[in-house]
């Protein structure tokens, strides 16, 4: 019985830690200030294919932010960062 409760506690920790990290990223990334910073950085990109991908992901991130979908905002922002090589 004790082993089961220890496993349940460990599982709960693994589930809650990523959710907490996602919330921290949302507070940092899903803001108008960060979106403006990203727009400026994307505008300076020289690879047209990567720039197109970054713009697309950034637009989806903005849409998610405006819809108050913070997990979607973070997911698309991560992809925008990846397209930018960050």
Image: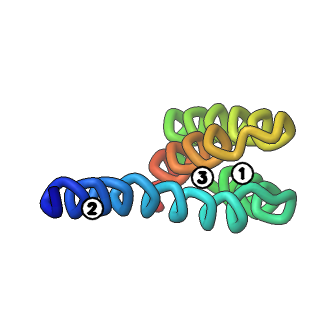
The label nearer to you, 3 versus 2, is 2
Kind of element beneath mark 1: helix
Which quadrant of the rendered structure holds the N terminus? Answer: bottom left
Residue at 33% x, 58% y is 14
| Labels 3 and 2 touching (C-beta < 8 A) | no
Say which mark, if any, is on residue 8. none
Using the rendered view, name the quadrant where residue 65 is placed.
top right
Q: Nearer the viewer, residue 56 or 20?
A: 20
Residue 9 image point, x, y percent: 31, 61
N-term-proximal mark, 3 vs 2: 2
| Separation of residues labelled 1 and 2 (CA atoms) | 44 Å
With respect to residue 12, does 79 lie above or below? Answer: above
Kind of element beneath mark 2: helix
**27 on left or right of 76:** right
Using the rendered view, name the quadrant where residue 51 is placed.
top right
Residue 67 image point, x, y percent: 83, 34
Q: Nearer the viewer, residue 4 or 24?
A: 4
The label nearer to you, 1 versus 2, is 2
Residue 44 image point, x, y percent: 67, 57
N-term-proximal mark, 1 vs 2: 2
Residue 24 image point, x, y percent: 61, 67
Q: Which residue is mark 3?
A: 45
| Labels 1 and 3 touching (C-beta < 8 A) | yes
Kind of element beneath mark 3: loop
Q: Nearer the viewer, residue 65 or 54?
A: 65
| Separation of residues labelled 1 and 3 (CA atoms) | 6 Å
Say which mark, if any, is on residue 43. 1
Say which mark, if any, is on residue 10. 2
């Amino acid at each position: 019985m004790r082993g089961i409760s220890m496993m349940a506690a460990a599982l709960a920790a693994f589930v809650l830690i990523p959710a907490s990290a996602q919330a921290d990223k949302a507070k940092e990334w899903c803001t108008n200030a960060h979106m403006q910073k990203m727009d400026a950085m994307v505008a300076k990109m020289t690879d047209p294919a990567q720039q197109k991908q970054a713009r697309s992901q950034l637009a989806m991130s903005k849409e998610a932010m405006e819809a108050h979908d913070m997990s979607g905002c973070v997911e698309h922002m991560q992809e925008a960062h990846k397209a930018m090589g960050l």
